[in-house]
Amino acid sequence: MVPTLEDVVRITGLRVDGQAVTGTTYRSYQEPVERLLDLEVRGERSSLVGRTALQASLGVANARHRTGEGQTEYLARLTEDARAVLAEEEGEAADRDLRRFLILVIGKLILGTRGDPVGFRCLPLLEDLSSVGNYAWGAALLAHLFDSLGTSSRETGVAGFPLLQVWVYYHLPSLRRGVARQRGVVPLLQRWRFCRDERSLRR
């Protein structure tokens, strides 16, 4: 039993049909990153940028929950912080901010890298923002999840982990750590309030 494309749609709401998420690997992503995101790439690996630098460009560098802060207060704080730096009018600045947000979501949740850096390999697909919704991001997530599981060996972090976690909650109920809070909401990922598991994976 493994997650399927149908599971991806039910859990995340992402498309599994449409244009394939493919592209060309460039020797350097310096030019598209500067042109499309207006960010500076440092170091040898021009295909990566630090997550915190990307979050700072979106105004959410302090995106962690504060002690005693409820979900409503947390989202209100993030919204206020983001509004202070994001473009208010449509145009190039708003498109740049949208691309920054999308590359953060794609680079950390859909095609996640281990550790802090966010990958830019999908940036060329975000050049035409009107076509972004035509891609099969759900199929890409599942393919990347299987690839990550095959190469993870002793790693505890796996790309697509929220998908895998919710899939386990539904198919292996004895392993549940979250609490179902809403019924009938799609995608299923939104139904769960996750509880932090403090147990160590190393024994």
Image: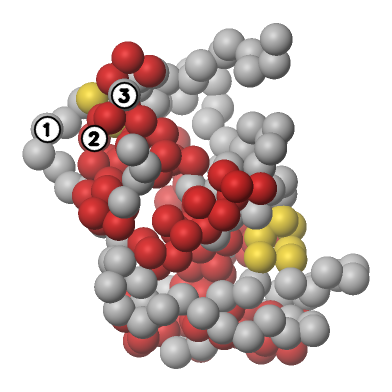
CA distance for labels 3 and 2: 16 Å
Give the residue drawn at x 90%, y 71%: 44
Q: Image point 51% across, 63% down: which residue?
A: 106
Q: What residue type is labelled 3?
A: Leu
Find numbered disc 2 in the image and state the secondary structure of the residue it sits on. helix
- Seen from the viewer's position, the closer of residues 152 and 45 is 152
128, 15: nearer the viewer: 15
Identify the image quadrant of residue 117: bottom right
In what element is the residue under mark 1? loop
Q: Name which residue lies at 41% across and 84% down.
A: 129
Tell which of 120 and 151 is nearer to you. 151
Distance of mark 2 from mark 1, alpha carbons?
Answer: 7 Å
The answer to whether any part of residue 85 appears in the image is: yes
Q: Badges 2 and 1: C-beta atoms under 8 Å apart?
A: yes
Amino acid type shown at disc 1: Arg
Q: Is residue 200 left or right of residue 100?
A: right
Q: Dividing the picture into quarters, in which one does residue 156 lie? A: top right
**In this rendering, which labeled residue sits more in front, label 1 or label 3?**
3
Q: Farthest residue to the left: give it.
A: 184
* Rendering quarter of residue 157: top right
The amino acid pointed to by label 2 is Arg
Quickly name the residue at label 3.
172
Where is residue 6? Give x, y as percent: 24, 54
Residue 108 visible at all:
no
Task: Say which residue label 1 marks.
Answer: 183
- The quarter of the picture where the C terminus appears is top right
In percent of width and height, residue 50 lies at 74, 57
Q: Name the residue under label 2.
A: 191
Q: How far apart are marks 1 and 3 (CA)?
A: 18 Å
